[in-house]
Amino acid sequence: MAGTIIAVENLTAAYGDNVILKDVTFSVREGEIFAIVGGSGCGKSTLLKYMIGLYRPERGRVLVNETDFSSADEDEINRERLRLGVLFQSGALIGSMTLGENVALPLREHTSLPPSLIDRIVKMKLGMVNLSGYENHLPAELSGGMKKRAGLARAMVMDPKILFCDEPSAGLDPVTSAELYRMLAKINGDMGTTMIIVTHDLELIFRIVHRLVMLDGREKGIVAEGEPETLRRNASDPRVRHFFTHGGGLL
Amino acid sequence: MKEARTARSFSLAVKERRSQEIELSVGGELCLENAHLFSGEMDRLVGGAPQGKVILDLSPLAYLDSAGALAVYSYREAAGHRGVEVDVYGGADRVRGVLEMIDVGALTTPPLRSEEGRTPFFVRAGEGFVSLWRDFVEVMTFLGELLTALVYVVRHPKGARWGDVLFYMKRAGEEALPIVGLISGLIGLIMAFMSSLQLKQFGANIFVASLVGIAVVKELGPMMTAIIVAGRSGSAFAAEIGTMQVNEEVDALITMGFEPVRFLAVPKVLAAVFVVPLLTIYSMFFGILGGLIVGVVGLDLTFYTYIKQTMDSIRLFDIFSSLVKSAVFALLIAGIGCQRGFKVAGGAEAVGESTTSAVVSAIFLIILADSAFAVLLHYID
């Protein structure tokens, strides 16, 4: 299919005998902000780990940029990973390194750029997430929102084609998360980065997400797929309606 | 002045007693403090074995909390088992609200997971054996990965993180100097003192020097150093990598195209392998020094005779084999520490578990390797 950048085909995921996902199939188009939503424990983060190549699919296929993660060898997967950026839930900055070193890490390892240029790129990327001047801070000295933004700077440092975000708004106050959404939307608009966001934050979904799939823990698979607005208005499945009207049934 | 808190209490009064019915009113405050008294009071007023129906009027009740409501429910339930019906009516809005909060279903739902310890002995023994085997396979797999990464670093020295190696050498080596020196010195001292008590009787004072020298150089130096390093650094390696695992830092490294074993474990292992043999030499020195103090002060040996006797009884081969041995110990300590760290899944508790397991496994492996060396060196020598 033209414009497809990620294709998940009949993916079945299990920890031992415990099946988490069964026969999941969907695709992500180039340049869109795509969300994977669902209540806690429905396998969202597991699915993400398959899509970034941390888990190897045993049944089904995951194709990212036409690299097949089920059959590619370790080198091919590693090469593909360089074209992906991942923003982890808590930022996942290396605690023993300063922000500058953290952001520079992929550049130092995978490019032969001179140190002075690396420094400038680091400054630019930190500026992009409103953290100018923080390159000598250690992650422990920052607030949760700053860590997440620094994580975003590190994820974007190689200008990846695809950015994965694991619950970007978890643990952030509404103002900070709104700021993060704006940043993600801007990156997507300016650079055309495809984004896959794992979330259960309705505000995020309605503000910036173009298309989504909804997973359900009991069904062990996708219960809805489409644009957020359309799903909210037209969904017939009670679980989907429930999610879009009650915020996952929490309130 | 602090005012004494008055105890909260409820009051029960019989309103009406009919042939098959009894109606009571509940007043005051029924709450966590006094809920346990409720059913006793009820039994006292209603009489040991009530029949028919008990009616409770809650209108006079000023305060009811969830524990109080539970007491009312429990009484009704217990009475139900005896065939007595309990009716509750009246009560302010708040009181009724609290009563309605009680989810009767939740009280009777059995736990979803049965309590532990009910699995039969043989099943548990089998599970224990399987997990032991799995652990062995995991350690071996990790050892393979580690050796591959070490070989890579030997072939591409630029690929190693030498800054980190130096950092861990300082952590595991330099910072361990005081404790290694102190413990080794004391061990030498104790050994010389204890053996001198025996050897003195035969006038064999001079052999204290040989005994301490041989013991410290061949066994105690490498072993004590390794055990101290396992406690100080093996645990630290496991905790550090384990915490990184919990914070998804290890996953982040993988997605950025790093090999976590090469990035995190290799610098620690290299640092340990460089530094532990040096610490061992240092430990031997202090062990012999401890013995020397006892020899010179307590046994009237001269400094020269003691040193001469020590040097005559140890050979260069002994020192060399001990250094090789301690390098192997270092590999085991750092390797198992990192492996236990990478195995962490879950939260803070898992990190604690992995740290404990790193030290225990490291000490076990040290003893095991030492026995192997004892046999091996016997045949080589």
Image (spheres, coloured by chain):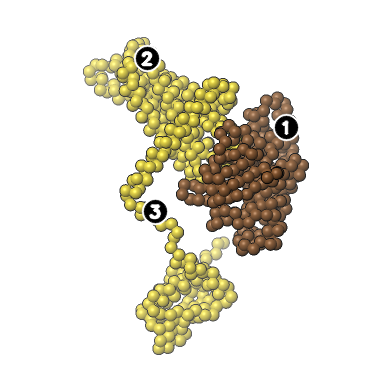
Could you tell me which residue is drawn at 53 percent across and 24 percent down?
B152
Name the subunit of mark 2.
B
Q: CA distance from mark 3 to mark 1?
A: 55 Å
**Viewer-nearest residue: A205 or B5:** A205
Q: Position of residue A156 (x, y in %)?
A: 69, 38
Residue to which mark 2 is pinned? B317
Chain painted in yellow in the figure:
B
Is A41 displayed left or right of B362 in the figure?
right
Decide: marks 3, 1 in contact (CB < 8 A)?
A: no
Label 2 SS: helix
Tell me the crowding category of disc 1: few under 14, some 14 to 19, or many 20 or more residues within 10 angstroms, Cα based.
Answer: some
- The 10 Å Cα crowd at callout 2, few under 14, some 14 to 19, many 20 or more, is few
Q: Tell me the quarter of the picture where residue A225 sits.
A: bottom right
For the residue pair B67 and A84, the one nearer the viewer reads as A84
Rendered hue of chain A is brown
Name above or below for residue A183 compared with residue B25. above
Residue B353 occupies quadrant: top left
Q: Residue at x 54, y 69 (%)?
A: B101
Q: Mark 2 and mark 1 in contact (Cβ < 8 Å)?
A: no
- Vertical arrangement, residue B189 with respect to residue B313, above or below: below
Circle 3 chain: B
